[in-house]
Image: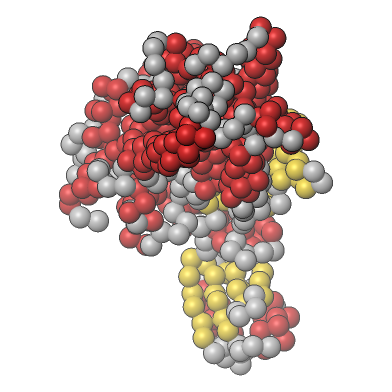
Amino acid sequence: MSATENATLKSEMVRRGSLHLINVPRIKRWGAYYVLEARIRNMSKWKFSILAASIGSPLFYLISVGIGVGSFINSHSAGRGIDGVKYMTFLAPALLAQVAIQDGLSEVTFPTLQGFKWEKNFFAMNSTPLTGRHIAVGTWLSAIARISLTVVAYIAIMYTFGAIHGWSPLLAIFTAVLGSAAFSALMMGATAAIKNDDMFLTLLQRVAIMPLFLFSGTFYPLKSMPEFLQWIGWCSPVWHATELGRWLTYDHPLNGNSLLIHFSYFAVMLVGGLWFAIRTFEKRLAK
Amino acid sequence: MTSNFRIGDPLIRASKLRKEFGDFTAVNGIDFEVRKGESFGFLGPNGAGKSTTMRIIAATLTRTSGEITILDKDPEVHGPEIRAHLGVVPQQDNLDAALTVEDNLYIYGRYFGLSKKFIRNKIEELLEFAQLEEKRSVKVEALSGGMKRRLTIARALISEPEILMLDEPTTGLDPQARHILWDRLFRLKEQGVTLLITTHFMDEAEQLCDRLMVMDKGSIMAEDSPASLIKNFATKEVLEVRFGSGRNVELADTLRTHCDRIEVLPDRVLMYAESGEDLLHRLVSNGLQPLTSLVRRSSLEDVFLRLTGRTLVD
């Protein structure tokens, strides 16, 4: 060993010891925030790919389907479009709901698999005072942060394209985030329960997310589907979020009962999903 | 929690500690005590129950039965309160590969709720300690195995833990990286940090541990200082002789008449004696000419062989 290596470390601080340094009640209160902070630091390393995926894909849909298919539909409906509005206005809230759900899903599935399987960094977090509840809630909050950013950017694009007008569409930010936050909580729990992740993400995307996107009244009203296929939309978070988004961005009619159903659907999914996720995280960390 | 522990006070107390996974008993009712400031080692082969015991101490795995307290607290009731004072170095590095060296230290410090200012100062000290100053802005995925290991140890020290737990700290490292790590761990011990180490390397156990618990199949086979274990369970020297394949077993009974104890391994015979040279002379003068011979001091490997009938690395 060299002389340098044997020399006393020059920057050594006076050791105070963890018994004097650490405030456990504070960590119990703020643990999820520390996880969120770490996740945001991690996300910032991928900011360009995140932005490209989050904004690029719905933007292309809006241009190709909204403008392309839209001009075709508008010209064949004597300018009445669909649901009493031009096609772009009809389509945009559905794409908003879809992009929010897609983003939320990416932000809970990848980190959860990374944390439990690929890099096992959830176990590193759990070797500190952080608990499974902190890790689950912090990861979920980071998904909400990303969803919020995407949704706000997407709303701005919708205004730029003239798909929405006035102030009330701004409230659709809340419903889009709510829908995605609820679904993300549930899917985070499901991902944490997965033991063998081979094909999991591919299957999730192709067998669950893609059909939800296609069968949730995204491109046409759900009622125009045969009745035996409409149930997919009724179960789908994309449809519930789309209905609320359309209600807020233009005058898509929703009565009190429908509103109650849509909000209750998300409230139950959010509370149940979060409970399930926390429980699954705690169980898996203790194995 | 207040600092009322002094050097020599028991920090960990376990009694009849047991852990079962279904039908498999990983830890079979063990008792031990670890005192502040000592370097305590769990020595045993893979599957001996070392890592399971470590996870119970780290308050991340529940016990099936028995009692254990860490810093006078029950890990099943006060998990976060205990983990706040532990530095954990797992067997496999679980760093965030997409983040830089510095970021990994920073986020880990935040998990302990430490202030940003404290962490920034501490990072400087730890980068120097781990000899990673030049790598501070490099992503973890670009580091060598030894660097990752040093970073994992540095990360565990960010909260100035009372107990540093190292699970197989040098497995997979080259000899030079191992010696650098041992040096760093020795410095920590000098600062009064209690070290808890699992290893299946006898030289590591001898170098680092004041006291050792030899484990096999979930049970404690012996517990003492490395020197005392060797003194109590092995002779001063060992003569290793090879007579060629097949002949080792054939000659076992004859060899046994020349010393108190022998161990017949697939490739050689170990003969335990106070003087290996004298024993070798006796063998040769009796017409037993080995193909090769080696006299060495007894080690913990011999202790383990004596206690379990098996070698540490199967």
Give the side of residue A227 with respect to residue A238, left or right.
Answer: right
- Extreme residue in the right direction: B23
Q: Is residue B213 above or below residue B73?
A: below
Q: At 76% from the left edge and 41% from the top edge, which residue is drawn?
A: B20
Say which of A169 and A112 sits in front. A169
Say which of B251 and A251 sits in front. A251
Q: How many marks?
A: 0
Q: Is residue B288 above or below residue B70?
A: below
Q: Is residue A41 above or below residue A17?
A: below
Q: Is residue B25 above or below residue A158?
A: below
Q: At 43% from the left edge and 41% from the top edge, which residue is drawn?
A: A68
Say which of A200 and B8 sits in front. A200
- Extreme residue in the top direction: A256
Q: Is residue B175 visible?
A: yes
Q: Is residue B159 visible?
A: no
x%, y% of residue B241? Answer: 56, 81
Q: At 32% from the left edge and 20% from the top edge, which residue is drawn?
A: B115
x%, y% of residue B159? Answer: 38, 28
Give the side of residue A101 with respect to residue A55, left or right.
Answer: right
* Screen quadrant of the C terminus of chain A: top right
Say which of A185 and B291 sits in front. A185
Image quadrant assignment for residue B16 = top right
What colour scheme does the image use?
secondary structure
x%, y% of residue B166? Answer: 48, 43
Image quadrant assignment for residue B124 = top left
Q: At 36% from the left edge and 51% from the top edge, which residue is drawn?
A: B141
x%, y% of residue A26? Answer: 45, 13
* Screen quadrant of the N terminus of chain A: bottom left
